[in-house]
Image: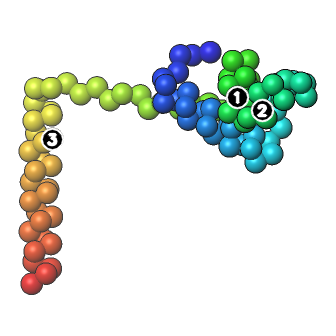
Amino acid sequence: MERLTKYELARMIGSRALQIAMGAPFMVKMTDEDLVKIGYNPIEIAKKELAADVLPLTVRRAKPVIKQVGTEKNKTDKADKVKADKKAAEKATESKE
């Protein structure tokens, strides 16, 4: 299993606990004795599923966009964006008049 951030862990456990609380079947075998021991707590059940690596959830991460600072292309892109923003602002003020 890949390493998850604390935010991803919290999101996955919380999402799975909600599913369990709404009646989803458990992905790990648990006896009645085990359930009584943890107090039928869906969060604890979700943690056990995570530890067993059987959570039916995946994490999708966006790949970072790496831009080269100081290249001519980036400078012209920024200048073009500023020009386009100015034109859009001019059109907005013209349409108000």
| Mark 2 element type | loop
Q: Position of residue 6 (x, y in %)?
A: 49, 25
Q: Residue at x 15, y 26 (%)?
A: 69
Q: Which residue is mark 1?
A: 44
Characterize the local packing of mark 2: few (<14), some (14-19) or many (20 or more) Cα atoms within 10 angstroms.
Answer: few
Label 1 sits on a secondary structure element that is helix
Outermost residue on the right side: it is 32
Between the C-alphas of marks 2 and 3, the distance is 59 Å
Q: Which residue is mark 2?
A: 39
Please identify, in this view, whether the residue under mark 1 or under mark 3 is nearer the observer. 1
Name the residue beneath numbered marker 3.
Answer: 77
Q: Callout 1, which amino acid?
A: Glu
Mark 2 vs mark 3, foreground winner is: 2
Identify the residue shown where x is 52% and y is 29%. Answer: 8
Residue closest to the eye, 33 or 57: 33
Circle nearer the N terminus (1, 2): 2
* Amino acid at circle 3: Asp
